Amino acid sequence: MSLISQAADYLIYRAKSFKLHGVHSPFVFNLYHQVILHDGAFYAYPRVEAVREDLLANGKTIEVTDFGAGSKTINYKSRKVSDIARTSLKPAKYSQLLFRLVNHFQPKYVFELGTSLGITTAYLAEAARKAQIYTFEGCPTIASIAKANFDYLQLRNITQVTGNLDETLQQQLSQIPQLDFAFFDGNHRYGPTMRYFEQCLAKAHEGSVFVIDDIYWSSEMKRAWQEIKNHPQVGQTIDLYFVGLVFFRKTQPKEHFTLYY
């Protein structure tokens, strides 16, 4: 997807998005005001961001196995950890949004489809210390670096699942009673994204929250996001441009919100 197309998508998003005064749903109004736009500090922020800085300074070269759509900027297998950190890690703004969402909803069972170097995983685990965090990563070398970060932060509520998501996701889903929160960042293609969404949907409930990453990353991801919004089991969605939030609340009408963030 070209930079021109991405710029056009962003301009359309900005034209459609609105701020707090335009939200008429009490649930979305409160979530937007109290969680999404919250700009205060939390104890976890400096802890996790210090690990990010170490990764950005790590010049070690590793061999990478990639089962997803890959990186738009790095397409070779031997990569520096610092390059992976620079191009693949979610920016603090969105990593900390995940922290606030989990901190707000306090889920018991959390899935992260795409560990990378573990920054977003750490934020998820810090936000709900009593939750069970299951994080899926295809590359064993990257997973080992993430584990070292979890050990450094003394995060004991994380279970790492390494291997191809096509082989690991369904097996892990069968071992949990419900899925309260899921972050989809494991494959940026239409087919796998929809397949993983449908698989996770089988364990979702009215209070579940799904976060879809990079919903404008490509034409395939835009198609997947449109299909997710229209899915009969989906109740409410929030488009924040870089991520999409999905809710299943039956107590309010099916609605889609495009909010400025």
Image (cartoon, helix red, strand yellow):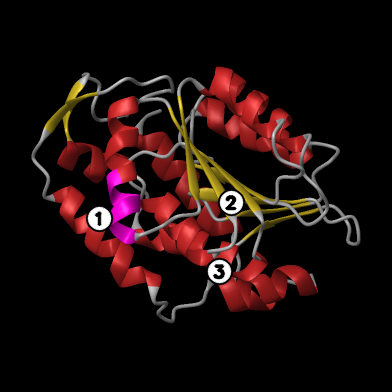
Comes first in the chain, label 3 or label 1: 3
Q: Residue at x 57, y 18 (%)?
A: 167
Instruction: Give the number of the mark in front: 3 or 2.
Output: 2
Q: CA distance from mark 3 to mark 2?
A: 23 Å
Looking at the image, residue 102 lies above or below residue 232: below
Q: Nearer the viewer, mark 2 or mark 1?
A: 2
The image position of residue 115, as x and y in percent, is: 42, 40
Identify the residue position indicated by label 3 in the image. Answer: 36
Q: Position of residue 10 (x, y in %)?
A: 46, 49
Residue type at tag 1: Arg
Label 2: how many residues lie within 10 Å, few (<14), some (14-19) or many (20+)?
some
Q: Which residues are magenta?
A: 148-153
Give the image quarter of residue 70: top left
Q: Quadrant of the N terminus?
A: top left
Secondary structure at badge 3 equals helix
Horizontal relation, residue 252 to residue 151: left or right: right
* Residue corresponding to mark 1: 52
Q: Residue at x 61, y 77 (%)?
A: 33
